[in-house]
Amino acid sequence: MRQLLKSTLAVCALLLLAGLARAEVILTPDEIEQTLAHGPWPAVQAPDPSNRVSGNQRAINLGRRLFEDPILSRDGFMSCATCHQPDQNFTEGLPRSMGRKLLDRNTPALLNLRAHRWFGWGGDSDNLWAQTMLPILHPDEMDNTADNIKATMERGPYASDYRLLFGHAATQSSETVLVNVAKTLAAYQETLMTGNTSFDRFRDALERGDALAASSYPRSAQRGLKLFLGKGRCAFCHSGPNFTNGEFHDAGVPYFLGPGRVDAGRHAGLKTLLSSPYALDGAFSDDPHKSGAWAVRSVIPTHANFGTFRVPSLRRIAQTAPYMHDGSLADLDAVVAHYNEINTERLHADGEQLLRPLNLSSQDKEDLVTFLKSLSDD
Ligand code: HEC
Ligand code: HEC
């Protein structure tokens, strides 16, 4: 009996010790400070002032139906959802998108879009509704015309919803109808947001000074976070609550597309942006103050833009493989290996001094992946 009591006590003590070893915050005060900058989440989301139906429930409903309806393509061949599949976090799950032919880039997830200033891998647009018009008109994608879209909104199954929001399509120019349709699609896409993650619960507990709650975030994820903030230098580019600084960098992904063809990234995006009549400084913005338009006016294309791509958000990253603008990395292990072994010879943009081989142990790599996985909501 005594023996049994003794061994029970010993087991209890062991369990307690194991629990304590697990239950610990291993970040330095400096790292805690940096961690707080990656929240709070969800971020407060204001309606888009350039889109007068942003946040409007009727527009959101119409946008949702249009998103999944191939009626927006020239021949009924594809909808937005053909590539941005709702049950796949609005990705296509393929390395490169399959439009009417194989496209050059990966289909990005459509999540937390209100948090971005620039849209598309190369930043073709400075607002969501302008970005939304590109695939509708692109010959390799939906290949439609503004005239067709207007005809669809005059008579088709959406005519009455359209009229309630914007008035009779018949009395408007084709271009205006196309912009309005894009604004309903944008209103819908703005609602696609990711929720609270185990990382967010950790971060919020640190903010409250609740060490007990913070300690339920696994040690391995905490070690990964330390690497993310420190040695890995990831947080320089993947900064803030949405884990992106929203700007364009060269992460060492090859940009050759084939003999004589390169993906110029931001360099090409800027050309599209600066010649677009649909930018925030244009007549189609509904914002009388033209807020945010300064950004497009202040960009000056330079050689350094060549082959840079927008830093992706890392929220729900574990669910949106494959990775990078060309979908060339199949999983998060491959991404971490890419940064670990980065070929600095390959970095072409001037002054991208942040990246260098990291010399991570296999435990480090595992920890970094565990951390990245903690950025997904359940
Ligand atoms: C043929 C496949 C395909 C179709 C159809 C398609 N997309 Fe995309 N989408 C892509 C690809 C590929 C990209 C990346 C484009 C780039 O950056 O050059 C993209 C990018 C985007 C972006 C930018 C996201 C970001 O994070 O900046 C938005 C928004 C978007 N698409 C919305 C739509 C909407 C709305 C529709 C329907 C009107 C649509 N797409 C139709 C493949 C597609
Ligand atoms: C110099 C800025 C910079 C740094 C530092 C950086 N990244 Fe990135 N990251 C990018 C850019 C830019 C891309 C997209 C590159 C492309 O598609 O060509 C990217 C892509 C990614 C992706 C794929 C996202 C997707 O949706 O395809 C992941 C995951 C990622 N980075 C994680 C990390 C981690 C982990 C670190 C640290 C080891 C890190 N990054 C450091 C800029 C950076």
Image (cartoon, rainbow, N blue to C red):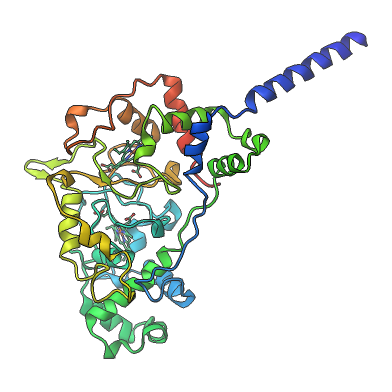
Identify whether 179 is placed above or below 140.
Answer: below
Drawn side of residue 344 relative to residue 52, left or right:
left
Residue 21 percent location from the top left of the image: 65, 22
Quarter of the image holding residue 11?
A: top right
Quarter of the image holding residue 236?
A: top left
Residue 358 percent location from the top left of the image: 33, 24
**Could you tell me which residue is drawn at 15 percent across and 65 percent down?**
275
The front one of 305 and 68 is: 305
Q: Residue furthest left?
A: 260
The front one of 47 and 131 is: 47
**Could you tell me which residue is drawn at 68 percent across and 21 percent down?**
18
Quarter of the image holding residue 50?
A: bottom left
The front one of 367 and 144 is: 367
Report the number of numbered marks. Answer: 0
Q: Is residue 54 visible?
A: yes
Q: Is residue 125 visible?
A: no
Residue 346 percent location from the top left of the image: 18, 31
The front one of 212 and 291 is: 291
Quadrant containing the N terminus is top right
Q: Residue furthest top?
A: 3
Quarter of the rendered image showing ligand 1: bottom left
Drawn side of residue 228 relative to residue 79, left or right:
right
**Could you tell me which residue is drawn at 52 percent across and 30 percent down?**
222
**Could you tell me which residue is drawn at 19 percent across and 67 percent down?**
276
Identify whether 194 is placed above or below 219.
Answer: below
Residue 199 percent location from the top left of the image: 53, 41
